[in-house]
Image: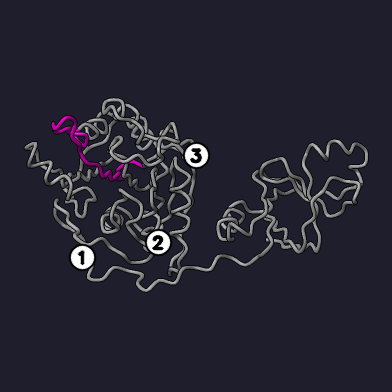
């Protein structure tokens, strides 16, 4: 990384730059920003339609991974702009970040980095009455899976240094555990709010520094991944529209879909991508629950399981996970007695293998 400080730096729009004509040749071009609407120069005069910035830093990188890591580490409020495409200069690719400070984010100080009295599960019934609160784990993101589940999965079905995928990262539980247990991770979500929550959740000190990449992406299209490149997949999809995670603001969000058959059809597109990117003999863990429609039980989990088998996965385990502390439980207790139906208090944690 190369750092260059400017006491003064000037910016103008591309349209204003084009309007300069021959006069543009007198400007010392620095770089073009991420929006492709702003250009930055080290010199300008009052005849130009410019904005002036004082005491800013231009960071340049030859390595894209270092560029992305620094962009992630810098406080969002300090980054003025950055290049999304590389520049070919002096025979090498270069990437740029413009910032008013080169200080990286202060990591969150946490009281407890690891769980106390943790024991790895060895049966097909899992129950965690108290949700883990180590590191930056919390229950603010409705519907996210408990860290105990993810920790068990990582320890049983992956190894340190493996490259993992969570195509619907949600509140970031998988990413936190991957950082603690030294697993590399591609964490995707179609919801930018989930990406931001996960980014913040990773702001703590750990003895490991695995590569954790966050990407805004629809899980039905994992074009960024090559065939058979992933060591382990973890997925906690929405249960149709039981919880709508984007308030219907993101049209492609699977949690917008009410019709269960339609949901399974769209989720099958995700399954096909998971099968494609997973290495042979490796595992895919999926946590999903059932629902009711007009008081009748709808076996959503088993319908999803059938889609995995249809695509080519083999079922290794069916783990019953007991649910605790459901928000609506108090209200629905009386309803269940009045209308004579039982409350659903379990989920299915399927472990599939690609043979």
State the residue in front, 212 or 295. Answer: 295
Q: Which is nearer the N-term, disc 2 or disc 3? A: 2
- Residue range in magenta is 279-302
Residues packed near mark 1 inside 10 Å, few (<14), some (14 to 19) or many (20 plus): few
Q: Which residue is mark 1?
A: 119
State the residue in front, 343 or 262. Answer: 343
Q: In percent of the image, x 31 and y 25: which residue is there? A: 262
Mark on residue 182?
Answer: 2
Main SS of the magenta segment? strand
Residue 74 shown left or right of residue 315 in the figure: right
Q: In percent of the image, x 84 and y 36: which residue is there? A: 18
Task: Say what secondary structure mark 1 lies in.
Answer: loop
Q: Are marks 2 and 1 in contact (CB under 8 Å)?
A: no
Task: Say what secondary structure mark 2 lies in.
Answer: loop
Q: Which residue is mark 3?
A: 224
Visible residue check, residue 90: no
């Amino acid at each position: 990384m190369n750092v260059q400080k400017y006491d003064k730096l000037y910016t103008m729009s591309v349209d204003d730059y084009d309007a300069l004509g021959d006069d543009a040749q007198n400007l010392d071009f620095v770089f073009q920003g991420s929006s492709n609407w702003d250009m930055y120069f080290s010199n300008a005069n009052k005849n130009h339609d410019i904005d002036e910035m004082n005491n800013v830093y231009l960071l340049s990188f030859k390595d894209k991974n270092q560029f992305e890591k620094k962009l992630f580490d810098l406080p969002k409020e300090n980054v003025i702009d950055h290049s999304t495409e590389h520049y070919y200069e002096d025979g090498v690719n270069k990437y740029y970040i413009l910032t008013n400070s080169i200080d990286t984010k202060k990591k969150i100080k946490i009281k407890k980095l690891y769980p106390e009295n943790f024991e790895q599960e060895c049966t097909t019934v899992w129950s965690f009455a108290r949700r883990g609160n180590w590191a930056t784990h919390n229950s603010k993101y409705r519907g996210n899976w408990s860290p105990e589940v993810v920790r068990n999965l990582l320890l049983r079905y992956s190894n340190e240094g493996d490259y993992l995928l969570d195509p619907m990262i949600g509140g970031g539980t998988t990413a936190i555990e991957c950082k603690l247990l030294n697993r590399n991770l591609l964490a995707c979500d179609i919801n930018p709010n989930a990406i931001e929550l996960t980014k913040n959740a990773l702001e703590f000190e750990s003895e490991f520094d695995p590569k954790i990449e966050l990407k805004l992406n629809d899980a039905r299209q994992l074009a960024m991944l090559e065939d058979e490149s992933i060591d382990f997949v973890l997925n906690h999809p929405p249960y149709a529209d039981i919880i709508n995670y984007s308030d219907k603001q993101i049209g492609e969000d699977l949690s917008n879909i009410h019709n269960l058959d339609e949901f399974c059809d769209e989720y099958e597109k995700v399954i096909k991508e998971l099968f494609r990117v997973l290495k042979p003999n490796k595992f895919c863990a999926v946590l999903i629950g059932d629902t009711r429609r007009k008081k009748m039980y709808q076996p959503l989990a088993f319908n999803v399981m059938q889609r995995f088998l249809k695509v080519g996965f083999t079922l290794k385990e069916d783990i019953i996970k007991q649910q605790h502390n459901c928000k609506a439980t108090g209200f629905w207790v009386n309803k269940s007695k009045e209308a004579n139906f039982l409350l659903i208090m379990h989920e299915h944690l399927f472990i599939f293998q690609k043979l």
